[in-house]
């Protein structure tokens, strides 16, 4: 279009009477107003399109950020739950280890004491094999009793451990229920 306008201007300049071919001032103003209105409409359309595209991009970016924040919140909740579970498990393991160690120490001490006292008594008595056999049988009976006590202690400790584990599982279920309620509660508020 500019090329045609330039040719027209050159032609008008070369013509003998430029006033007869030149449009009047009113016609020029009208043409300019039409061109300005056309450009204004085009620019407005471009601006509206650009604004709509920007709004779409911002909405998509906002949705991605919200999804990332939700994932980070869920990860944080899981880590907190895992940390609490590990603390409880650590305490349970330490208590169980100490109980077993003490049971073994006391059991070995009792066995050692029983054997030493039995052997000392047998050697000091010197009454022959009958008395010695009776002492050994008595010591064996004591050892069996001590082993039975140790076994009972170990079973009791194991039962306590199972009880603690069951309580821990119950607490984890309650925590999960609370987390599910907590996750469900904000969704109700958003709707």
Image (spheres, helix red, strand yellow):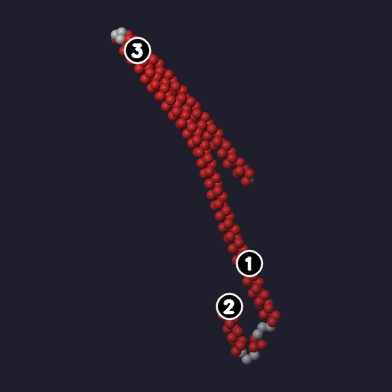
**At x 56% / y 58%, what residue is drawn?**
57
Furthest-left residue in this view:
128
Choose between 130 and 145: the one closer to the eye: 130
Give the total number of marks visible in the rendering. Answer: 3
**At x 55% / y 47%, what residue is drawn?**
70
Tags 3 and 2 in contact by the CB under 8 Å rule? no
Q: Where's residue 12, x and y in %?
A: 61, 87
Relative to 124, say whether 8 is above or below: below
Instruction: Residue 112: name its quadrant.
Output: top left
Secondary structure category for the residue under label 2:
loop
Secondary structure category for the residue under label 3:
helix
Q: Is residue 50 visible?
A: yes
Relative to 61, say whether 151 is above or below: above
Q: Determine which of the numbered discs, if any, sits on residue 121 in the image.
A: 3
Q: Which residue is mark 2?
A: 1
Q: Is residue 147 visible?
A: no
Q: Nearer the viewer, mark 3 or mark 1?
A: 3
* Mark 3–mark 2 distance (CA, rounded to whole Å): 128 Å
Who comes first in sequence, dot 3 or dot 2?
2
Who comes first in sequence, dot 3 or dot 1?
1
In the image, taking residue 121 as reference, residue 50 lies left or right, namely right
Q: Where's residue 54, x and y in %?
A: 58, 60
Instruction: Residue 37: name its quadrant.
Output: bottom right
* Mark 3–mark 1 distance (CA, rounded to whole Å): 113 Å
Furthest-right residue in this view:
26
């Amino acid at each position: 279009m500019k090329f045609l306008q330039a040719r027209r201007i050159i032609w008008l300049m070369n013509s003998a009477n430029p006033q007869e071919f030149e449009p009047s001032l009113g016609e020029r103003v009208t043409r300019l107003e039409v061109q300005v209105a056309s450009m204004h409409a085009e620019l407005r359309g471009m601006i509206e399109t650009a604004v709509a595209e920007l709004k779409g991009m911002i909405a998509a970016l906002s949705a991605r950020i919200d999804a990332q924040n939700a994932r980070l919140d869920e990860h944080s909740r899981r880590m907190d739950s895992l940390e609490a579970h590990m603390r409880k498990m650590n305490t349970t393991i330490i208590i169980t280890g100490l109980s077993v160690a003490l049971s073994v120490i006391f059991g070995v001490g009792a066995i050692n004491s029983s054997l030493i006292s039995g052997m000392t008594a047998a050697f000091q008595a010197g009454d022959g094999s009958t008395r010695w056999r009776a002492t050994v049988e008595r010591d064996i009976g004591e050892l069996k009793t001590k082993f039975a006590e140790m076994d009972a202690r170990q079973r009791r400790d194991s039962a306590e451990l199972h009880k603690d584990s069951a309580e821990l599982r119950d607490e984890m279920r309650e925590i999960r229920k609370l987390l599910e309620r907590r996750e469900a509660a904000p969704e109700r508020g958003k709707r």
